[in-house]
Image: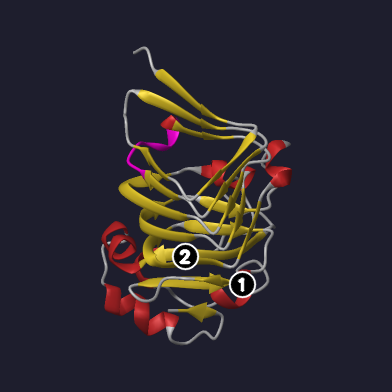
Amino acid sequence: MLYNKVFYEDREIENERLELTDKGSLYFLGSNVTFRKCALVLKVSGRNLLFDEGTRFIDCTFEVKQELKNHQQWVFASLTGCRFKGRLSGCDFGHWPDYSEKAGHGSIEDCDFTEARLDGCRIMGCDPAAIRFPKWPCFTILDPIGRARELNSVLWPGGFRPIIVEGQYRDPPRTTAVTFYAPALARRRKTTEEAFRSVIEKFDCIAY
């Protein structure tokens, strides 16, 4: 398939509504571009949405119309005062230079996910206290690496392990928060939301 390439770079875009919805397009939100007070409507897969180092979003709203899955390139971008709506799964945000050289420019602060549905989404290398997370049936584990021993000391439903600190699939040391969506997690683990909540309520490091 021959994609139409759409570039945003080397400029500042303010107070615009951008519809990134054409599945036949590749959207390059490139270097040295600042989006300020913009509404970005996303209805493409992560492979159609490409960020570069130095991309800045300030006071923007992201309306995710199609579930955005496994999109790690958020860690290339600087996000300040932004709001997210819609479904995101397996996405990472923040400062994660170990991911790639470009990711050394990433950050997230003062952002609001209360209107989003997050599942398996992580905050990397940034302070989660400056972020508003979605409420139950989402739940957010704060300081998961530091609390790993405590979190893994109890029996979770369906054999779930909230944080993995060793082995091939371990969570990166820079993980400062991770959010799950209980209904989807319960389906994957063949258990119930209530079973998860009964364990979650035992921890003061889990927000829900």
Q: Earlier in the sequence, mark 2 or mark 1?
A: 1
Identify the residue at the far top of this view.
2
Query: What element does badge 2 sit on?
Result: strand
Res 108 visible: yes
Q: Position of residue 140 (x, y in %)?
A: 48, 71
Q: Is residue 104 above or below residue 143?
A: above
Q: Residue at x 41, y 81 (%)?
A: 199
Res 98 visible: no
Q: Disc 2 marks which residue?
A: 179
Q: Nearer the viewer, residue 120 or 42?
A: 42
Q: What kind of colouring is applied to the model shown? A: secondary structure
Q: Nearer the viewer, residue 156 or 108?
A: 108
Place residue 66 in its image quadrant: top left
Q: Residue at x 45, y 44 (%)?
A: 70
Q: Position of residue 145 (x, y in %)?
A: 65, 66
Q: Please indicate whether residue 169 sits to the left or right of residue 121 in the image.
A: right
- Structural distance between the alpha carbons of marks 2 and 1: 15 Å
Q: Residue at x 38, y 24 (%)?
A: 25
Q: Is residue 78 above or below residue 143?
A: above
Q: Disc 1 marks which residue?
A: 130
Q: Is residue 58 magenta?
A: no
The amino acid type, in three-letter code, at marker 1 is Ala
The amino acid type, in three-letter code, at marker 2 is Thr
Q: Nearer the viewer, residue 103 or 149?
A: 103
Q: Position of residue 79 (x, y in %)?
A: 59, 55
Q: Which residues are magenta?
A: 42-47
Q: Nearer the viewer, mark 2 or mark 1?
A: 1
